[in-house]
Image (cartoon, coloured by chain):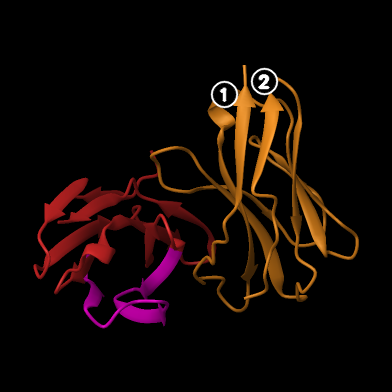
Chain colours: A red, B orange
Amino acid sequence: DSGVTQTPKHLITATGQRVTLRCSPRSGDLSVYWYQQSLDQGLQFLIQYYNGEERAKGNILERFSAQQFPDLHSELNLSSLELGDSALYFCASSGVAGGEQYFGPGTRLTVT
Amino acid sequence: DAKTTQPNSMESNEEEPVHLPCNHSTISGTDYIHWYRQLPSQGPEYVIHGLTSNVNNRMASLAIAEDRKSSTLILHRATLRDAAVYYCILRYRGFSGNTPLVFGKGTRLSVIA
């Protein structure tokens, strides 16, 4: 158990819909990262937050957005969903000094 | 980020040592070498990291070439639980080290009983 929790574990929705994925980092970790894993693209970094502020952006689509709240949990919002958005979405957290990232169990999103 | 090259797949017998190679010929002086692995149906997990010297921890050893252009992750006695995809990642440490990970395709390790 990494200490990072993600909900829901599975999500099935239709094209055009909007969903929210939630992540709670390890206690005390200020950085939260979101990654997407699909069969054709592998594991790709989407976005990073540090203590409530956006720190880095990767290959995140404009239809996707994220935020980190004062209690440090984070949400990833995916809108106007397309079939190609079906993937595993992982959240990771790391401490003040950086170092290793701890990954959650992931949310499997299926868009039908 | 500097690029790494790993074999697509490797196979090992249970209870034998495994050496997973990684080439990173364009590594810069501020890049740390990180290894993560992803077990089936799980998120990636940290294995080990190093800068110049060889490193050991409870999971594995990391051997880094003198010129730092390659490294080898060593699992001393492979178990069935070690079957996973292993990722070698170069990570800029910089000021805080809070940088995202850039994953390649990794090496899929199969362990045979």
- The residue carrying mark 2 is B14
Which residue occupies 83% across, 65% down? B69
Q: Residue B32 location, x and y as percent?
A: 69, 65
Which residue occupies 56% across, 32% down? B83
What secondary structure is the magenta-colored segment mainly? Answer: strand
SS class, disc 1: helix
Report the side of A23 relative to B86 (left or right). Answer: left
Amino acid type for the residue under numbered disc 1: Leu
Q: Which region is colored magenta? A: A44-71
Which residue occupies 70% across, 71% down? B31
Mark 2–mark 1 Cα distance, whole angstroms, equals 7 Å
Q: Quick check: marks 2 and 1 in contact, CB under 8 Å?
A: yes
Q: Quadrant of the C terminus of chain A?
A: bottom left
| Vertical placement of residue B64 versus B9, above or below | below
| Vertical placement of residue A90 versus B76, above or below | below
- The residue carrying mark 1 is B80
Q: Residue B11 location, x and y as percent?
A: 68, 32
SS class, disc 2: loop
Report the side of B15 relative to A103 (left or right). Answer: right
Decide which of B97, A104 is in the foreground and name it.
A104
Amino acid type for the residue under numbered disc 2: Glu
Q: Residues within 10 Å of mark 2 (few under 14, many from 20)?
A: some
Residue A73 appears in view = no
| Vertical placement of residue A45 versus B80, above or below | below
Which subunit holds the residue at mark 2?
Answer: B
Q: Does label 2 or label 1 sit earlier along the sequence?
A: 2
